Each structure stands twice: as structure tokens, then as C-alpha cells.
Image (cartoon, grey):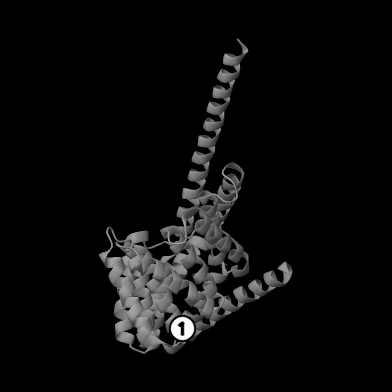
Amino acid sequence: MKKPILITFAIAATMLLCSIALGNEAQWKDLQTKAEQNYRDGKIPEAEEGAKKALEIAEKSFGPEDIKTASSLTTLGNVYRYQGLLEESEPFFKKALEINEKKLGPEDPGVVTALGELAMLYQLQNKSTEAESLYKKAMAIDEKKPIPDRTAMAITFDNLGVLYANQGNLPEAEKLLRKALDAREKAGNPDPAAVATSLNNLASLFGQQEKLEEAIAMQTKALDTMEKALGPDNLNVVLFAHNLAGYQMAAEKTAEAEAMLARVIAVIEKNLGPDHPALIEALLDLSEINKKMGKNDQADQLEKRAKTLQSKLMQQGQQNK
């Protein structure tokens, strides 16, 4: 008579454990999804908080070597990288790559993504040799597939193209950047923000070669595409608008550059407040434009404001040491 009782208890315990596991998975998925969306929307404090909670749940509920844990590690790595905390982000990307390779196999799409994330970090750290090696490894994996993943290939083409552009290898850079744009546009259900990134990178390459009209045309298209994808007041749109203003300044289209920089400043203020250090560069650029236009008073005010923010930033850095 005792045996059925034990079996019933075991079944009930298993059902309870399954219920808890499913609850934890739902909680993790909700936090992870929101963290990723906040990161895409430029809401970095919210993204960091959500990613930390998601990682904690993943490690406790699924284990430190689980794919869900790798996903949360990658998101948190991205958040730190976005903030320029490159050393802090490196162990997250390395661990995520290790988990993906172990759990999915060395040629899985998840491994390609993880390779790209770590390569991008190395690129920002000026570790060009390490970055190039990882990008090429990712490309080799994709090229082996019977049906290539156009989105994954585009990311690798884009990033390696940017690396070559920074090294001054402009012909090879342009070849890869055009391949990236072509792959993104031909992908099923193309991501507008990703297409805009490829356009932005090509515009940057034209700017390096002082092909300013081509750069302005390409960057205008990139900005329009990004705005349609994310909205005009999204913080991620600022980079595209600021780049366009830079090409307009170089081409001495001062009125257009002035309007674009004023817009950049307005979006940063709306998202981050009037005292954020992200304003410094735009304020200095707008000051330079105003000087060229003979608006010396406005130029002086803008420069003074930028220097005040620079001083605050330096003080904060000293306090954090």
C-alpha cells in the first residue's frame, strides 16, 4: 500500500518542479525580451537592470552552461559595450561563445552570432588581428551552409568591412560593405534598422574618400530608413543624423548642417536630459557652424555649455577613481 503513495508523491513532486521551471522560464523570457527591446530602443539603464535580472534567473534556474544563460550574457555584454565599458563586457561575450560552441556545436548560427559579438568588441579595443580572425571564422561557417543565412552574413560583411576601412584598405572595405547591403536587402523580411546601418557604413567610406555628395546621399537614405524603423526621436537615430551633419559641414552646407545638429541636440536632450555628456560633441560642432555663419554670440554660448559639461564629466571621472 505504501508503494502507490510514493509513486503519487513522486508524480506530484515532478509536476510541481515542472510548474516551477515553466514559471521561471516565462519570467526569464519576459525579462530577456524587455531587456533586448530596451537595448534596441537606447534605454540603457532599463536594459542593464533587466539583463542582470534575466541572467540571475537563467543561472539559478537553468544552469551556468545553458543557452538561455548565454543569451542573457550576450545582452548584458552588449549593454556594457554600448556604454564604452569594454573590459567589463569581454568576459560576458567570451562565456557566451563558449556556451554556444559547447551546446550547439561549432558551426551553429548561434556560434556565428557569438563570434561576431566578440569580434566587434575586439574591434573597439583596437585588437584588429583578433577581430579579423573571428570575423573570417564566422564567414567560413556561413559559407559552408547549403542555404546561407543572409542576415548573419550581412553582419559579418559589415563589421569586417568597417575594420578594413579603419585600416585604410578601402577597396576591400567597399566590396564587403556593398555585399552586406545586398545581403540585407535580399533577406526575407529585411530589417530596416540593419539596412540603415549598411547604408551608414557605406556613407562613412565615401566620406573617408572625400566623396561628399555620395556620402550625403547615402547617409540621407540611411537616416530616412532608420527613422521609419525606430521613429524620429529614438536615441539610436542620433548617430545617423550627426554623421549626416558631419558630411554637410565638410561640404560647407552650413544651413543644412546647422538644422541637423540642432535636431541632434534636441533628441539627446529629450532622451537623456540637458546635462548629458553625449551633448558635448554636437554642441561643439554647432558652435563651429555658428562661427562660420558669423553668429559669434550663439557660438560662444554653445562652446561654453560644452566646456561646462566636459568639466562635469572630468569631475565625475575623478570621483569614481
Q: Identify the residue shown where x is 60% and y is 15%.
A: 3
Q: Nearer the viewer, residue 125 or 249?
A: 125
Q: Quadrant of the C terminus?
A: bottom right
Q: Quadrant of the N terminus?
A: top right
- Can residue 263 be seen in this snapshot? no
Q: Nearer the viewer, residue 207 or 278?
A: 207
Q: Residue furthest top?
A: 1
Query: What secondary structure is marked by label 1?
Result: helix
Determine whether, in the image, residue 155 is placed left or right of residue 69: left
Q: Quadrant of residue 77?
A: bottom right
Determine whether, in the image, residue 95 is placed left or right of residue 134: right
Q: Amino acid at mark 1?
A: Asn
Tell me residue 264's x, y (percent). 44, 71
Q: Nearer the viewer, residue 170 or 249?
A: 170
Tell me residue 61's x, y (percent). 58, 42
Q: Quadrant of residue 309?
A: bottom right
- Can residue 287 be seen in this snapshot? yes
Q: Which residue is label 1 attached to? A: 166
* Label 1 crowd bin: few (<14), some (14–19), many (20+), radius 10 Å: some
Q: Identify the residue shown where x is 48% and y is 44%.
A: 29
Number of numbered markers: 1
| 176 in relation to 275, above or below | below
Q: Identify the residue shown where x is 39% and y is 75%.
A: 260
| 99 in relation to 300, above or below | above
Tell me residue 97's x, y (percent). 53, 61
Q: Quadrant of residue 153?
A: bottom left
Q: Nearer the viewer, residue 137 or 21?
A: 137
